[in-house]
Amino acid sequence: MIAAAIAILFAGGLIYWQFKARKAEAVNLSAADMALIAEDQAPQMRARLASDENARKEFAKNVRQILAVAEEAQNHGIDSAPDMRRSLEFQRARVLAQFYFDENGEKTPDITDQEVTDFFKQAANQQKFDLLIEDARKQDPQFAAQQLPPEQMEQLKQNLGRIYIAEERAKQKGLDQKPQVRLQVLLQRARVLAQKYAADKLRDKMKATDQEIDSYLSQHPELDTTQKKRAQAEEVLKRARSGEDFAKLAKEFSSDGSKDKGGDLGWFGPGDMVPEFEKAAYALKPGEISDIVQSQFGLHIIKLEERKTETQDGKPVEKLHARHILFSEGSPFGGPPQPPREKARAAIEEEKAKKVLDDIVSRSHVQVAENYQVKMPEQQPAPQLPPGFAPPGSQPGGEEPEEAPSPGAKSKTAQPAKNQPKKRG
């Protein structure tokens, strides 16, 4: 939850940024600055900012939070560590390189392998590459454990070399002096500093203690609905055993994706279901209904329909056809329900994160304009495609993609798996 809180507050694809370090100088973003930042967001987010005043204010608030945390990080010397300085310099290079490639488009002069090779023949540039790799290994144990083949290391070197060469070309063209570039560089710097400071200094302040969780649960008994769900399951079990149609009861009460099929799970064999469910199902005879079975997904009532034996790999395997009714607090399309203590933990840590941020913002010198205007992005003409070849949601009556959950974040709507009691791989 702490990692999620930090990700939501300081990332979300919000923005890039970096300026020269200025410990005593406050950042003051004008309405024009905020308009430039907003117009560099993804089209969907930009459209929302253009049409929703509250969204613009929330976006400005997020920008101010990032800058305020970065300011405090800088005042604590986070930016003075050699590895952090290298990281900040590299992020600046990435931003300038991206603007260089974006501005030239297909007309961008090619950076050849030989140019990259010549670039790293300079001792200072080779040392820069070596130190970046060393920093990456220190920060990522998984990367440190890998022994990259020479060809992969060379490819990595080629990629980094192109970034640094493009950065130099961007400076030669004066791109680093453009307002939108300076803003993006500043924000990228702020984001990196804020994330580092949050991980090193703020994480413990945001954690919920066991005592706080116990206290929260005592004040919010509604979070623990286990007894209520079990009482409902017991009532439905009585009705099923008294002869009511099991499939109709499943359609009415089950909370998973099989409810529309009357709880029908089809045929399954050993290892297909979670252990508690499998043990109870294999103990039934056709037509029998189980007691209430608890698994990580919730409470189940199982009715066995049929049994059969199949030969797999030369061995007989008994398979079952069953229905079930699931009583769960989880999403019909998501994972297991969240336990009451985890709900309490999430609520406490969200509140603590908010307080920590509010305190930092209140003592910062950062100023960000809340009242600014954003131009609606131009609608790109859709290519004319034969019927049936258009992407989902582009035809009349098609489903529109879900809106990005946070300013600047690009997201795709994926079709989730249904919450049946099968094992998760």
Image (spheres, rainbow, N blue to C red):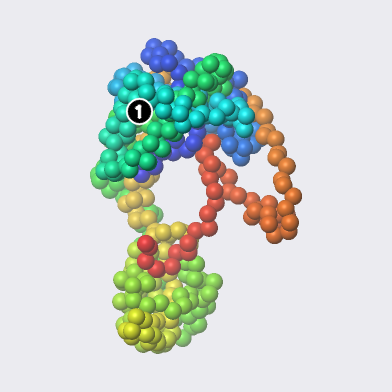
- Residue 320 visible in the displayed image: yes
Q: Position of residue 374 (x, y in %)?
A: 64, 28
Identity of the residue furthest to the front in this view: 114
Label 1 belongs to which residue? 129
Residue at (38%, 36%) from the top-left corner? 154
Image check: 42 left or right of 349? Answer: right
Residue 263, image x and y in percent?
A: 48, 74
Return the residue nearer the eye: 122 or 90: 122
Q: Residues within 10 Å of mark 1 (few under 14, many from 20)?
A: some
Q: Secondary structure at mark 1?
A: helix
Is residue 227 visible to the viewer in this orientation of the structure?
no
Seen in the picture, residue 248 relative to 410 is either above or below; the reply is below
Tell me the residue at 37%/85% (across/down): 311
Image quadrant in which the N terminus is located: top left
Name the quadrant containing residue 136. Answer: top left
> Where's residue 138, x and y in %?
27, 34
Compare residues 152 and 347 and report the one nearer the observer.
Answer: 152
- Give above or below for 387 relative to 126: below
**Quarter containing the C terminus:** bottom left
Is residue 61 rendered to the left or right of residue 154?
A: right
Estimate the x, y position of residue 337 in percent, counting from the top left.
39, 59
Q: Nearer the viewer, residue 316 or 331?
A: 316
Residue drawn 39% across the image and 11% down it: 24
- Which of the 4 quarters of the picture holds residue 395? bottom right
Number of numbered discs visible in the structure rendering: 1
**Which amino acid, by three-letter code, is at mark 1?**
Phe
Residue drawn at point x = 68 percent, y = 33 percent: 376
